[in-house]
Image (cartoon, helix red, strand yellow):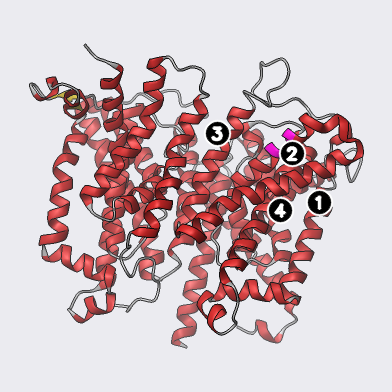
Amino acid sequence: MITPLDDFLAATVRTATPLALAALGECITERSGVINIGLEGAIICGAFGATIAAGAVAATAGAPLGLTAGFVIGAAAGAAIALLFALFTVWWRADQIITGTAITLFSLGLTGLLYKTVYGATGVGLTLPTLNASAIPGLSALPVIGRALFAQPVITYALYLFVPWLAWWFARTHAGLALRATGESPDAALAAGISPRRVQLLATVAGGTLAGLAGATLVLAQSGTFVEGMSAGKGFIAIAIVVLGRWSPRGVAAAALLFGGASALQYLFQSLGWTGVPYQLFLALPYVLTLLVLARASARSRAPAALARRELTLS
Amino acid sequence: MSVSSQAPWMGAVQRLALLVGGTVLTLVVLLLLTGHDPAIALRALVRGAVGSWYALTSATLVRAIPLALTGLCVALAFRAGLLNIGAEGQLLMGAAAGTAVLTALGASLGAFALPLALLSGVIAGAAWAGVAALLRQRFGVLEVISTIMLNFVALYTVGWLVRGPLQEPTGIYPQSASLPKAVQLPLLWTGTRLHVGLVLAVLFAVGLWWWQGRTASGFRLRAVGQNPHAAATIGRIDVARVSVLAFLASGALAGLAGTVELTGVTFALYENLSPGYGYTAIAVALLARLHPLGVLGTAVLFGALQAGGNAMQRDAAVPIALVNVVEALLILLVIAGDRLGAARRATA
């Protein structure tokens, strides 16, 4: 029997998936010393890219290929918008926060404009394939956590592998060391023969790729459609998740689960029949939680030393 | 550049011309890219923005008022080194507070109702910004993130208010009761929709310009914005105090914009009260180079762009989102121009 708790836990993991993807991407970017406030823009561009590609390919080549195209183009769209951000901040050393804000506004406007241009004012004719949950036999029958962890779309399972891999990559590989060195001390990295500019560029684009995947997940594995402004601040929540997760992949994944839970609470209370509480309270909860979490975590945790620093050895 | 040898206002005129030129150019490029006829669309835009006395006053200038007040909010904060992206939420809370005061006490206050409503907006905007100021000062929370989060919280708060405590008496529509004539801002010209909020915006712009340039506290604000460390060590300035006060003042301006919009234009509280004025305000402030008088100019430019954008959508089927893209592109162009200019100066 499926209880409200099962539903709540499953919704927690489902909502946490795009948050975790975007936050892990931002984690990579920030470990290189760049804070991409334009993450929100990469998410919405990823969502729109996925919508266009999945819709077009699925119409001619079937749903599986359509989904693949959606995730690939979504990731590419996120990477492209991050590349634009990197052009300004890594190449020209423009202010990362102001540029990121402008990139977010640009992306929200651009996707709204293209959506109306392609689909008209009402969005009719928009049919998308959806990535359904594929339950893992046996594991998904486990009590309490079974359905939550093992009856999810494939993209969630990919995260189970990606999080430990990323932790290993940060800690144990030469490239991971180069990334962390750049984020802590670009001058020292340069002295060790690393090009900080190249590392930051790659880290920013990698972060944008994951944020694009997050956007694709929102469309293809969750809402099943594109809505203007559907990123709804998730990029900024993801940045808070990175702080709460203390810039470590496992911490970030755990923090994403917390936020997934906060967003999923509304389903739990709906199924419990708590109609006396205004639903806006639940809608506002993830944003309030972000503020509380940042207040607790910002003061105590240490960001990469060179984060958001503009004066960088130019090579 | 030989700008320095000319009168200062020449530089401003040049910049405004460059800005208008850049706006038209990005508009044309985007229109062509999205498959619209630029001639038809631009004609609709000009007609909707400045095509008649009514369009100029009731479409362009009416929109310039909240843009100028929120633009001043952003410019003041940025000048102090505070990246307040929360003008939208502060505006909404100002409008909500004004509605609450007018619905609860409107009849009993008589002539004081309107000033008190405006004051409540100022306080609510400052309080909403105060949350971000507190989080920044006390806990080191990046104000960009906190103010954006507060924008969403404000939106849901208004969403709840207009379906709950402040809903109109019949309980059908998600909005507050319409404000009676007595508590609406007076019009500047009969036959138009232009209200005295314009005078307020101009007064605040001139006041801020004078204050920033001519007073010691204005100087402290700029010093903290340029280099808080130097301001503290060399200037012996209480950086925390200046930052918090600047943040509160910034929020107060956006809150005022909210009550001015409520009592001058919408006459009721609802969720879509602002079509993103608080976000456009960032472009307004940055393109004015944070100069309070410049904000008046860019606010009119963006007011015209929004008014014309509505006409373009109506008459030429161009999505209004195109205007948002133009605004964001202009910010990016200014940033790029600054950086390239800096690089050129460095190599010269």
Q: Is residue B291 above or below residue B152?
A: below
Name the magenta segment's main secondary structure.
Answer: helix
Does the image show residue A268? yes
Secondary structure state at the residue bearing disc 2: helix
Which residue in the rendered view is the most extreme toward the left?
A: A138
Residue A58, x across and y down, in percent: 26, 27
Query: Separation of disc 4 and disc 2 at Cα?
Result: 16 Å
Is residue B58 rendered to the left or right of residue B326?
Answer: right
Identify the residue shown where x is 22% and y is 75%: A189
Mark 2 or mark 1: name the one nearer the start of the chain: 2
Residue A17, x across and y down, in percent: 27, 37
Q: Which residue is mark 2?
A: B98
Query: Separation of disc 1 and disc 4 at Cα?
Result: 9 Å
Q: Which residue is mark 4?
A: B69
Q: Which numbered tag is attached to residue B276?
A: none
Q: Which residues are magenta?
A: B96-100
Residue A314: quarter of image: bottom left
Circles 4 and 2 on the same chain: yes
Is residue B112 within the magenta segment?
no
Circles 2 and 1 on the same chain: yes
